[in-house]
């Protein structure tokens, strides 16, 4: 490391992979008022805030029903059951995702069938989905990874031909567009997460199921509240999985800002794309046509350098990065018995690196990240 670089390292402010403070600060008074109003209201579970949030989200997404619940994971679990997935059914999904995608399938007694990804987009490869269909296949769970829509046209055709349901894992893609629709509204149902680091994040856990189908929404509402429409009239075994009033109130303050925030992420991504085009050992993210990626992550491939060394070089300069995901889900200890090999996902896990991104990450910060990368 040159003396000049050492100097930069000491003096520059750190750049975390995600900084939530600018957006929180900008809305501070409204957020504080919203939380205080809930505390004074005495209504904490499934009250007016959740109801209003659900109708505002339904309108934003352009979907008939939005059903709030406890987390993105619960949204997946409840939606799987609501669309009719039963124990023993096979559900085709991607191995290149957060564990919860597959965990939700296994937790209801269904069987996750992992198929390989498209190496360009990191999303599930529709051709592989088609090959994996058996008489026991009941549903497909694509993930809109890093904020980019999966190939929903191709998946929709496959689902129609083979009479399968589609549950979109849209946890990382609130507000992303595919054609003229928002993701999470293209399949039978969509599951969203409001985990604080997601594009639309609460001050705690939260999730939501979107669907156009009345029967699916009805089943989801039943399942999230102990399987009962009315107190002491439980009809089926459900869950305690409600979105609470405090989180709904916070999310209602943030929802009107999601489009400009996502636009800010796209600006950051475009600048990275431009600056990194001159770094031959970095492959920038590929985006599909006629879709708006919301860049939950800006994930590059490191080719021809040691990825872990690149990461520690950035760390020494105060730049935070993450590896999403270091181990593909089918290789996790819990699924070791499956003994499948999915070369494209396994290869990606060894090369990916997610760089700092956020709605208001400054141009100066993006330049500094790229300058530090160029030192290698
Ligand atoms: C975050 C996430 C989930 C789970 O959401 P939680 O709200 O944390 O339960 C599921 N799938 C994907 C792809 C995610 O990124």
Image (spheres, rainbow, N blue to C red):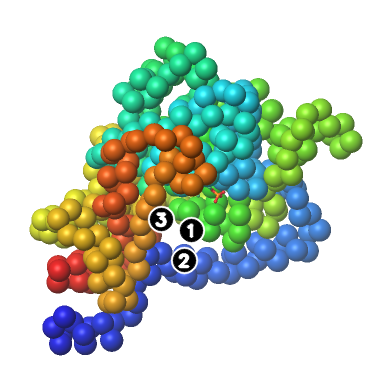
Dot 1 or dot 2, earlier in sequence: 2
Q: Residue at x 57, y 38 (%)?
A: 104
Q: In front: 357, or 163?
A: 163
Whether the residues at callouts 1 and 2 have beta carbons within 8 Å, the answer is yes
Q: Is residue 367 visible in this depiction of the protein? A: no
- 6 over 179 or under it: above or below: below
Q: Nearer the viewer, mark 1 or mark 3?
A: 1
Q: Read off the residue under disc 2.
A: 20
Q: In front: 204, or 43?
A: 204
Report the disc number at residue 261. Answer: 3
Left or right position of 89 against 350: right
Where residue 26 sits in the image (x, y, percent)? 48, 68
Where residue 119 sits in the image (x, y, percent)? 26, 39
Q: In front: 289, or 352?
A: 352
Where residue 171 sits in the image (x, y, percent)? 49, 45
Q: Quadrant of the C terminus?
A: bottom left
- 172 over 318 or under it: above or below: above
Using a 10 Å C-alpha cutoff, classify the residue at mark 3 as few (fewer than 14 neighbours), some (14 to 19) or many (20 or more): many
- 7 over 33 or under it: above or below: below
- Find numbered disc 2 in the image and state the secondary structure of the residue it sits on: loop
Q: CA distance from mark 3 to mark 2?
A: 12 Å
Left or right position of 267 against 160: left
Q: Residue at x 35, y 20 (%)?
A: 131
Left or right position of 150 against 282: right
- Find numbered disc 1 in the image and state the secondary structure of the residue it sits on: loop
- Find numbered disc 3 in the image and state the secondary structure of the residue it sits on: helix
Does any atom of ligand 1 lie closer than 8 Å to the CB of label 3? no
Where residue 93 sits in the image (x, y, percent)? 44, 32
Q: CA distance from mark 1 to mark 3?
A: 13 Å
Q: Read off the residue under disc 1.
A: 197
Quarter of the rendering containing residue 234: top right
Dot 3 or dot 2, earlier in sequence: 2
């Amino acid at each position: 490391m040159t003396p000049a670089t050492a100097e930069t390292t000491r003096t520059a402010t750190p750049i975390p992979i995600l900084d939530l403070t600018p957006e929180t600060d900008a809305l501070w008074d409204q957020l504080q008022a919203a939380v205080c109003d809930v505390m004074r209201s005495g209504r904490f579970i499934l009250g007016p805030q959740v109801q209003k949030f659900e109708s505002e989200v339904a309108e934003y997404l352009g979907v008939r029903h939005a059903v709030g619940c406890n987390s993105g994971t619960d949204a997946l679990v409840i939606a799987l059951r609501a669309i009719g997935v039963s124990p023993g059914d096979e559900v085709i999904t991607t191995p290149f995702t957060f564990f919860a995608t597959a965990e939700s399938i296994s937790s209801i007694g269904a069987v996750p069938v992992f198929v390989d990804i498209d190496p360009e987009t990191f999303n599930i490869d529709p051709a592989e989905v088609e090959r994996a269909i058996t008489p026991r296949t009941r549903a497909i769970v694509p993930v809109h990874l890093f904020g980019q829509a999966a190939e929903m046209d191709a998946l929709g055709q496959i689902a129609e031909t083979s009479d399968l349901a589609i549950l979109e894992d849209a946890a990382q893609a609130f507000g992303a567009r595919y054609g003229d629709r928002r993701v999470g509204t293209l399949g039978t149902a969509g599951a969203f997460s409001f985990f604080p680091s997601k594009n639309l994040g609460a001050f705690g856990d939260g999730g939501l199921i979107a669907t156009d189908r009345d029967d699916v929404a009805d089943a989801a509402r039943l399942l999230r509240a102990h399987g009962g429409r009315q107190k002491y009239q439980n009809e089926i075994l459900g869950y305690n999985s409600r979105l609470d009033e405090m989180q709904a109130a916070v999310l209602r303050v943030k929802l009107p800002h999601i489009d400009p925030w996502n636009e800010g992420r796209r600006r950051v991504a475009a600048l990275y794309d431009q600056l990194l085009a001159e770094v031959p050992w970095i492959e920038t993210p590929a985006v599909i046509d006629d879709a708006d990626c919301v860049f939950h992550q800006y994930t590059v491939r490191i080719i021809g350098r040691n990825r872990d060394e690149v990461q520690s070089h950035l760390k020494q300069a105060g730049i935070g990065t993450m590896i999403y995901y270091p181990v593909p889900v089918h290789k996790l200890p819990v699924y070791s018995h499956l003994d499948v090999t999915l070369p494209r996902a396994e290869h990606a896990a060894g090369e990916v690196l997610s760089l700092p991104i956020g709605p208001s990450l400054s141009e100066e910060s993006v330049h500094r990240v790229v300058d530090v990368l160029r030192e290698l």
